Image: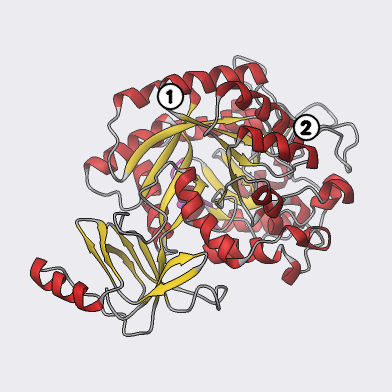
């Protein structure tokens, strides 16, 4: 690669003009003549960027769900639905494409003209004859139709999260445990070939955005089997660090890691989400005074799983959105050891920052939550809203933060994530920005979080920067990533020195 603007460092900013990748690793940096000479001797293809394009390390999305991203791409897109009637119309227009369950993702009742949660009566006429599930944008709640409600009564145990109408009938809104159980039922009806197709859809979308590696969270048995089959068929393109559901962590001993797919840890849940009012708070919700949220897993069980994972040489990643949930995770990691992850850490009280520094986890955050959770002040009030996503405070306390999208919860476009980290919605009139602009990051800090720090988060120290000996994973952009990030476009994605995506 010659005649490019190649970012070898973001802090301080350092740019060179050439590099050579040999056998998947970066071998030469910054010497055009040496690159040309070596490439000729080794018969390595030369890519001339003609002083037009910019090169950065491939983006690393440290926390996302490849299988659910594939479902989102294949399913009914409900992100921009503005009313319950519009919701029904969107479903009706696309329902015929599905073989078994009808599914879609992305609605948010906070955007609805009706200003209420939908129920199954709102969609039964739109979905007739087949079960249907439509996940809320946060992936902690869903709307199901009457056909799917029948499955609720097949559970052999009482589960949390079946919302009721005033007459005690199931409303069709399911949260947390009930959502997970229904989603499992839907996936049981899907064959392995369909699961593989969804994962391939997702990886193609990811590499088109310059994302070369991901932390795939909450991997279940079906997705694990699908990925292993894709690997054996040489159809995996993107690097995956997998974090398994705890009930299959033992399978890590049976599976050999390679350069593209590695099992790195397990994923646990401490609480739910703010959007569904299931995040576990120290004090009640401002807009639901009788509710403090949901404890997904008690401290004792979190610790037990963390210690089991440690025995298997696996990291633990624990979801904690509410500040009370974060208290529980801090206590667990004091006993389980350092080097683990906290996912989201959406609300952090000031007195928790020093406690976090003692435990020293890597914090994997989703800056675009700031945009999607535009209603957060209603949930928390102004005082607690000031505690939401304190990125700069975390860094100032010596903690490492990595970036991710939790896709399909947020758009996978890295430049939207970077914009949210820099501007915190101030350029979109998000009210939270009035109280939290002091937590904004610099653009250099944002790129570091999306590359070097995300490499740490997914436990791949061989990734995340353009240095000799690192993997040849790159994103080539049409504009300067520092001066013009928001209007930027990925023109090429390279993994292991191979072009895996090229724009038309």
Quarter of the figure with residue 460: top left
**Residue on which disc 2 sits:** 293
Residue 382 visible here? yes
Number of the front mark, 1 or 2: 1
Quadrant of the snapshot with the N terminus:
bottom left
Q: How many marks?
A: 2
Instruction: Check the image and tell me how it is coloured.
Output: secondary structure
Q: Nearer the viewer, residue 356 or 194?
A: 356
Q: Nearer the viewer, residue 79 or 361?
A: 361
Real-space CA distance between mark 1 and mark 2, rounded to the nearest whole angstrom: 28 Å
Residue 87 image point, x, y percent: 67, 55
Q: Residue at x 61, y 36 (%)?
A: 319
Crowd around label 1: few <14 · some 14–19 · many ≥20 (10 Å): many
Q: Residue at x 35, y 85 (%)?
A: 51
Q: Which residues are magenta?
A: 94-100
From what the image shows, is residue 286 above or below residue 503? Answer: above
Residue 72 image point, x, y percent: 51, 51
Q: Magenta span has 97?
A: yes
Crowd around label 2: few <14 · some 14–19 · many ≥20 (10 Å): many
Taking the image as shown, residue 292 lies to the left or right of residue 36, namely right
From what the image shows, is residue 456 above or below residue 82? Answer: above
In the image, which disc is placed on residue 489? none
From what the image shows, is residue 110 above or below residue 36? Answer: above
Residue 98 visible here? no
Q: Earlier in the sequence, mark 1 or mark 2?
A: 1
Q: Residue at x 60, y 21 (%)?
A: 335
**Residue on which disc 1 sits:** 249
């Amino acid at each position: 690669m010659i005649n490019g603007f190649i970012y070898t460092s973001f802090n301080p900013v350092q740019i060179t003009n050439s590099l050579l990748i040999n056998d998947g690793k970066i071998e030469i940096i910054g010497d055009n003549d040496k690159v040309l000479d070596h490439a000729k001797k080794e018969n390595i293809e030369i890519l001339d960027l003609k002083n037009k394009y910019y090169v950065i390390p491939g983006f690393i999305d440290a926390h996302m769900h490849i299988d659910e991203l594939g479902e989102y791409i294949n399913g009914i897109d409900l992100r921009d639905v503005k009313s319950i009637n519009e919701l029904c119309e969107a479903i009706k227009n696309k329902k015929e494409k599905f073989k078994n369950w009808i599914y879609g993702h992305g609605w948010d009742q906070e955007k609805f003209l009706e200003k209420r949660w939908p129920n199954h009566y709102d969609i039964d006429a739109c979905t007739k004859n087949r079960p249907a599930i439509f996940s809320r944008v946060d992936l902690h709640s869903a709307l199901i139709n009457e056909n799917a409600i029948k499955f609720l009564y097949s559970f052999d145990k009482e589960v949390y999260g079946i919302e009721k109408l005033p007459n005690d009938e199931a409303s069709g809104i399911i949260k947390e445990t009930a959502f997970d159980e229904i989603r499992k039922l839907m996936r049981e009806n899907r064959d392995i070939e369909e699961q593989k197709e969804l994962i391939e859809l997702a990886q193609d979308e990811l590499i088109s955005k310059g994302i070369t590696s991901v932390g795939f969270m909450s991997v279940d048995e079906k997705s694990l089997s699908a990925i292993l089959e894709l690997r054996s068929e040489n159809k995996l393109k993107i690097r995956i660090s997998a974090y398994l559901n705890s009930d299959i962590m033992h399978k890590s001993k049976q599976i050999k890691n390679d350069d593209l797919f590695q099992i790195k840890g397990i994923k646990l849940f401490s609480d739910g989400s703010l959007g569904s009012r299931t995040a576990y708070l120290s004090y009640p919700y401002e807009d639901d005074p009788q509710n403090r949220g949901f404890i997904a897993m008690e401290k004792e069980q979190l610790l037990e799983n963390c210690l089991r994972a440690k025995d298997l040489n696996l990291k633990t990643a624990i979801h904690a959105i509410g500040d009370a949930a974060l208290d529980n995770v801090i206590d667990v990691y004091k006993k389980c050891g350092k080097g683990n992850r906290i996912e989201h850490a959406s609300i952090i009280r000031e007195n928790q920052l020093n406690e976090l520094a003692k435990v020293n986890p890597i914090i994997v955050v989703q800056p675009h939550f700031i945009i999607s959770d535009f209603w957060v002040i209603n949930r928390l009030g102004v005082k607690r809203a000031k505690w939401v996503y304190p990125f700069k405070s975390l860094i100032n306390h010596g903690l490492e933060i990595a970036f991710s999208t939790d896709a399909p919860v947020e758009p996978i476009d890295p430049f939207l994530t970077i914009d949210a980290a820099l501007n915190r919605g101030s350029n979109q009139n998000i009210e939270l920005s009035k109280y939290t602009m002091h937590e904004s990051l610099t653009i250099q800090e944002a790129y570091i979080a999306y590359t070097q720090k995300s490499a740490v988060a997914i436990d791949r120290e061989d990734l995340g920067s353009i240095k000799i000996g690192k993997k040849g994973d790159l994103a080539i952009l049409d504009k300067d990533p520092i001066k013009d990030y928001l209007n930027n476009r990925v023109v090429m994605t390279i993994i292991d020195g191979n072009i895996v995506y090229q724009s038309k």
